Amino acid sequence: MAFGTPVGRASVQPGDLIFHQNTYTAGLSHVGMYIGNGKMINALNENAGVVVTDITSDYWESRWYGARRL
């Protein structure tokens, strides 16, 4: 991830991109946009489409890779 400024988990702001690893494949594999209040908007999968997700859930917390502010 060469673009943007790294953002710590506790410092994310609406509009920051949040990256996750080891979701449907090994390594960096998912990105969402933080929208505030512990939530991100992201394309979950082809069936569910775009959803709002709680980034503090066990699933997303355990797969946190990092965040960037562009």
Image: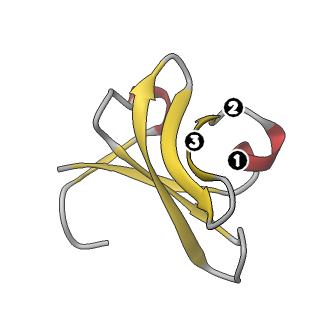
Q: Residue at x 69, y 31 (%)?
A: 56
Could you tell me which secondary element the residue under label 2 belongs to? loop
Q: How many marks?
A: 3
Horizontally, residue 67 falls left or right of residue 1, namely right
View extreme (right): residue? 58
Horizontally, residue 11 falls left or right of residue 44, namely left
Q: Residue at x 62, y 67 (%)?
A: 46
How far apart, in angstroms, are the residues tagged by discs 2 and 1?
Answer: 6 Å
Closer to the camera in the image, 18 or 49: 49
Could you tell me which secondary element the residue under label 3 belongs to? strand
Q: Residue at x 48, y 28 (%)?
A: 10
Q: Which mark is residue 60?
A: 1
Q: Amino acid at mark 2?
A: Thr
Q: Position of residue 39 (x, y in %)?
A: 54, 29
Other residues around mark 1 within 10 Å, as few (<14) / some (14–19) / many (≥20)? some
Other residues around mark 3 within 10 Å, as few (<14) / some (14–19) / many (≥20)? few
Q: Position of residue 60 (x, y in %)?
A: 70, 47
Q: Nearer the viewer, mark 2 or mark 3?
A: 3
Q: Amino acid at mark 1?
A: Trp
View extreme (bottom): residue? 26
Q: Earlier in the sequence, mark 2 or mark 3?
A: 3
Could you tell me which secondary element the residue under label 1 belongs to? helix
Q: Which residue is mark 2?
A: 56
Quick one: quadrant of the N terminus?
bottom left
Other residues around mark 2 within 10 Å, as few (<14) / some (14–19) / many (≥20)? few
Q: Which mark is residue 51?
A: 3
Q: Position of residue 48 (x, y in %)?
A: 67, 53
Q: Amino acid at mark 3?
A: Val
Q: Pointers 2 and 1 in contact (CB under 8 A)?
A: yes
